[in-house]
Image (cartoon, helix red, strand yellow):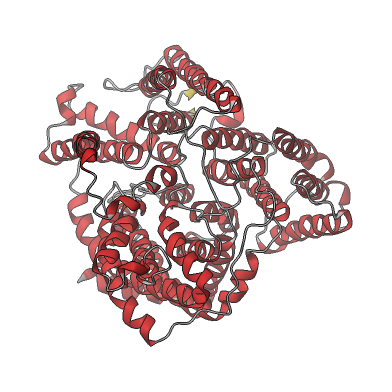
Amino acid sequence: MDGINALIDGFGTALTPVNLLYAVIGVVLGTAIGVLPGIGPAMTIALLLPLTLRLEATQAFIMFAGIYYGGMYGGSTTSILLNTPGESASVITAIEGNKMAKRGRGAAALATAAIGSFIAGTIGTLGLALLAPEIVKLAIKLGAPDKFAIMLLAFIAVTTVLGSSKIRGLASLGIGLLIGTIGIDRSAGGQQRLTLGIPQLADGIDVVVVAVGLFAVGEALWVAAHLRRGHAEVVKVDGARMGREDWRRSWKPWLRGTAIGFPFGAIPAGGAEIPTFLSYALERKLSKHPEEFGHGAIEGVAGPEATNNASAAGGLVPLLTLGIPTTATAAVMLGAFQSYGIDPGPRLLSDHADLVWALIASLFIGNTILLALNLPLATVWAKLLNIPRPYLYSGILFFASIGAYATNTSAFDLWLLLIIGILGFFMRRYGLPVVPAIIGIILGPVAEYQLRQALQISDGQLSGLVNTPFSVTVYVIAVILVVAPVVIDRIRSSRAGDGDGDGTHHVPHLTPQSANQEGQ
Amino acid sequence: MSSTPTATATQKEGRSEYGVALLLLVLGGWAIVDGLSLTDTASRGPVSAKTMPIVVGVLLVAMAVLLVIDLARGGRGEAEGGEDVDLSHGSDWRTIGLLVGAFVANALLIERVGWPISGAILFFGTTFALGARHYVRMALISILLSVGSWYLFFLGLDIKLPVGLLKGIL
């Protein structure tokens, strides 16, 4: 069990007073920013990224861990107390959780979400610690063709599984790949590509600028154009606690949710959206009180919330072992790793073992701090929801501007930020999903490098891309991903005439609406 | 994609979506032209510096064409929802214009007058654009935030944001 030993070393690094302080700061900031309406986990990380600019890599990673789980938990509080979710993975939490809150059971909803997130996060992180070294053992043997195949799979998965329109998903991916190509091509001849002769573009566009522009500025402009007149209704709560009956009804959904969420997060086709739907459907089927579903059933909060967090932990498996982000949040984190000169991939765990294990240990620590803070502080977080909207969205633009400027202390980045923000605005307006774009930006250059390597090894023969059993398997999966939804659609529409209404039909209409949102 | 074509506004927005296709076409064309203009002598193998821009360009152009076909058949991009988003009215261009204005003012001023002033202008301008009208409160919060963040970055993070006109005072 080399994983366990390494993990203990990781705790040794993470538990020094200074590093512990960074974990606490990460959790508190992550939760506080994540709770704010309209700010999902990806924007939370993007906005807080500049704070880690001058930190050592270890401390920055420790803070990321806190921000990651903090931002996730903050989002679920928002969904429960406000009606609509800020991220696709919280759609379900919003349905049942908000109904519970309106029936005066907000405290129980917040508690089951907090404790469920803690349990799922802890089990999920343990899964990550045990699984990652094993996967790395396999991944280290993968060659360039295999890696390229996985990246292609990630592109296809993120465009076909998540979006409601494949054309718009692919268009968004194309925009991302285009932005990722800007700058000097380091692996072939060092030429400037797509820089329009602007010297500041030679190094490419900084990940902070891209992430903050797409998520923060784009979102703020979009919301500003459609700001809800009058106040969104915040349900009042007086804390987060649950009774014996709530525990009895919650613990099984927590565990089942964890079991569903982790594997879905770990495969590079993820997102937490599908597993949360599955968990919800499962809990409704197994519940002794199916009639409560849709009116505030605690199982409908406990299951999906646990799923959401387990899937977030699972998502770190491909990120840390293969360098593949499956969600927007993971993509932003990957970009942050790169800015430290760290190249996530199979070698990460051996080259930067201390960093990675400190990160994983911090996930455990952050999760525990989160639970300790959130049960007593729930009412404080709830107050943040009442912040007047003009100040909230001005604040987002204000901190986005500081972040973009501070990265290179250059006003040029502010102009870039504005352009990317306007791009993000129009993507939201015309239903181009943002997640494929950010994944394309981060992963595009890596995929290009692997493709080049693969074809150099094979002397230009295209067969060099499919000459390993592994790459062939991955391509088959990719084809299934493309073909299966079409086939299922056909079958479903030919059956639609029967109208048997087996209960699952209430949920699916939510998918396309949520698919355009931020992802987690 | 299940929009009910009742209001003329909906049809108008449908037409403006062809602009997205145009943007994709322009971006794709730019990538292809830029890719073709590169002369790559250094790299070995079939994937040269040109390959990526051209592949991406072709992808974007193809998506532009497919999007036009989709739109002609009545397909529509779904605008994104959210906690504070009300899609029942159209985009409020005046607010967007004012926001962009405040943003541009900051970008122009930050290195001339310094962040403590330009940041305050940014925050004041954006809150005004978003409909706040408590001028005293807005001004106080703006100054507090911009000066506070300048000190936070300077003392806490060792990042020097421009101090500009207030040099020697802060």
Count how many numbered circles sit on residues in the image.
0
Q: Position of residue A167 (x, y in %)?
A: 38, 28
- Quadrant of the snapshot with the N terminus of chain A: bottom left
Which residue occupies the foreground of this view, B99 or A105?
A: A105
Q: Residue at x 77, y 35 (%)?
A: B108
Residue A66 visible? The answer is: no
Q: Position of residue B2 (x, y in %)?
A: 43, 34
User: Quadrant location of residue A247?
Assistant: bottom left
Which residue occupies the foreground of this view, A199 or A33?
A: A33
Position of residue A311 in the picture relative to residue B166 (left or right): left
Which residue occupies the foreground of this view, A328 or A340?
A: A328
Q: Position of residue A353 (x, y in %)?
A: 33, 62
Q: Residue at x 57, y 30 (%)?
A: A201
Position of residue B63 in the picture relative to residue A184 (left or right): left
Please, is residue B62 above or below residue A498 in the view? Answer: above
Q: Residue at x 38, y 20 (%)?
A: B66
Position of residue A26 in the picture relative to residue A358 (left or right): right
Q: Residue furthest bottom?
A: A244
Please, is residue A445 above or below residue A192 in the view? Answer: below
Which residue occupies the foreground of this view, A36 or B106?
A: A36
User: Quadrant location of residue A441?
Assistant: top left
Q: Position of residue A145 (x, y in %)?
A: 21, 35
Position of residue A472 in the picture relative to residue A369 (left or right): left
Residue B9 visible? The answer is: yes
